[in-house]
Image (tube, coloured by chain):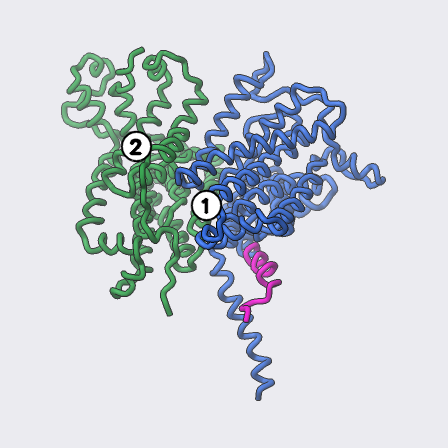
Amino acid sequence: MDIFSLFDISILGGTIRMATPLLLACLAGLFSERAGIFDIGLEGKMLVAAFLAGAVAATSGSAWLGLLAAIAGSLVLAFVHGLASITFRGNQLISGVAINFFASGITVVVAQSVFQQGARTPQLSGDARFDPIIWPGALTKIREIAQAGLPMKIYSQLISGHAIIVYLALLIVPLTWWVLYRTRFGLRLRAVGENPAAVDTAGISVVRLRYSAVLIAGVLCGIAGAYMSTALQAGFTKEMTAGRGYIALAALIFAKWRPWYALGATLLFGYLQALALRPDILEKAIGVKVQVQLLDALPYILTVVILAGFVGKAIPPKAGGEPYVKER
Amino acid sequence: MEKMPKWADVILIPIISIVLAAVISGLVLLATGHDPIRALGIMVSGAMGSSLGWGYTLYYATNFIFTGLAVSVAFHARMFNIGGEGQALLGGVGVAYACLFITWPHWTIALIAAIALSALFGAVWAAIPAFLQAKRGSHIVITTIMFNFIAYSLLNHLLVNVLKPAGSMEPATASFNASTHLPTFADMLGVFGIPFASDAPANFAFVIAIAACVFVWALIWKTRIGYQIRQFGEQESAARYAGVSATKIIMISMIISGALAGMMSVNNVMGEAERLVLNSSEGAGFIGIAVALMGRNHPVGVVLAAILFGFLYQGGTQLAIQAQIPKEMVIVIQALVILFTGALDHMVRAPLEKAFIAFRRTPSQTKGA
């Protein structure tokens, strides 16, 4: 038994990489739900974004163009969700489910007919991928890192060596906090999720605010999806988001709809996913061989456990899921 | 005055939604370089042009009747059970335990055991999220989705480490013994001298599915608990004041829902594959959502919608074979149906209501003048 190996630097580095798409999706959900729109469709938006990023990066050779395409695709789905849940006052959960299925099907259909490679996009390399940024003085060779001291290990593996989207995601956390709690837009956004009638009475458009929130969520899911296929992996594969959108929703509840808590919650889930990728380390730490199927299920089981037991009292935005009907 | 006659609400709106979904699917096919008219032709002839095609269509429809009913029962209590897929997988495990180890004297007895175990396993898999929703407030949508993922891993574990016969490399159980084989449509119709393709997978489980429809109809509209489920779904606070226990309704509706989803495995695992394989439910649990929405949560509607999706599924398989269109195209159509019948309902409904009001007003005005 060696419980400290659970906090191996390479696991913690993996945590940051695995947490990034969760964090972006979680913040997307945060904007949407704080404005009173449930968003089960985070998963589908990420998946379509991951595909478009992979496809456009593969054909154009530019990861940045891939990112733009990802954001555009995700925005289209976000707009459909807005149309269904804001304009036509439909059931927001059902709309989200529809978006997820649509993404699940359309990515395979299009990937297969464009690339003919069994529903994947070609392997990305060079400029078509967001490569890790090596900070000045950071070590890159495994042998050098193994011999270095702890501060150098932390600097080289935790702080340095991530794709630019990772740093971007971390910057979006304080930005989200600032927008929500320090700007007029943020105040109104939070108000529209709690009491849309009051916002309406003050002469501010509920519809416009909610659309902005839903579209911001679209942009963030787009970045999250692009990260999946152009940074975390080198290309799109079928169903590559693998439930991350739902885990992000669980993290959002765990975080009680707050930006900094969202960072904490997604790091926790990211840690679990990183650990699930390293059965050797887990085995060393607890001294028992763990079934690979159990490891696969672990992030989902713990999501349920956390939702059931440790959330405490999580009070969602009061008007969440309710379409707003202007009085006539 | 009602805005629209009931027949328009029940028939016209689903048809318009289907047409919208079909048009968009056609555009997707065009955009990916296929001919939508030819695709439709392949689907119709492949799914309905022969008794073999019908045998597949009705086989898939049987799956979707079970999962559609499952989603409907939960919907009546305003519970959104997205976990039908996992519950159906677990139901398959129940069927496997009922069929693998015992030599039954007759298939009817094996069938009863398989129904009981598959319903039990499915019900348990739904009861856990239901309990967490009722007692801990964990969102049922998220927990049932998580339980789908967990069910995949659990099934994988059972097939690889427990149920796989020694020496076999494939993650699947041994074939069930002959005492558990259900009669196919060819066997059943052969009794009356009606010929039917003998290799079509439709089987006796279709009869069970129809019986389940009658059961759900009686449960929801003819019993006290059904009334309470509907009352709870319509207005939770009013139901609470009337003394209805939220925990009881959530648990009962989800347990019945899970049991129905689990029973789907009588069709696909016991009736068709005659062994348990990985991913045995093939997304049928999710299709139940579209079927329930289209069928307006009524058993008759569920049967019709299930046959439609059976047609899409079988037609989609033929598309994959004959036109190299990935079978995931069916998932796109399914998503569009969910979108139009579930989320964009008002978009379809509002112009229709206006049209009906305008249509009604004109004759009465002319009479007045």
Residue bearing the label numbered 2? A19
User: For numbered disc 1, what is the local secondary structure?
Assistant: helix
What's the residue at 50%, 21% (across, down)?
A: B157
What's the residue at 53%, 66% (across, down)?
A: B352
Q: Is residue B187 magenta?
A: no
Q: Pointer 1 indicates a residue of which chain?
A: A
Dominant SS in magenta: helix
Residue A132: horizontal and vertical position, in percent?
Answer: 25, 29
Q: Is residue B101 above or below residue A226?
A: above
Q: How crowded is mark 2: few (under 14 residues within 10 Å), some or many (20 or more)?
A: many
Q: Residue A97 carries which label?
A: 1
Q: Chain B is drawn in which colour?
A: blue
Indicate the amino acid at tag 2.
Ala
Indicate the amino acid at tag 1.
Val
- The reply to whether discs 1 and 2 touch (Cβ–Cβ < 8 Å) is no
Residue B286 seen in render: no
Image: magenta residue range? B1-18
User: In the image, is A150 to the left or to the right of B274?
Assistant: left
Residue B65: horizontal and vertical position, in percent?
Answer: 62, 43
Residue B107 seen in render: yes
- 1 and 2 marks on the same chain: yes
Image chain in green: A
The image quadrant where one finds the N terminus of chain B is: bottom right
User: In the image, is A327 to the left or to the right of B260?
Assistant: left
What's the residue at 42%, 25% (across, down)?
A: A296
Q: Is residue B6 magenta?
A: yes
| Residue in front for this viewpoint, B338 or B147 | B147
Nearer-N-terminus badge (1/2): 2
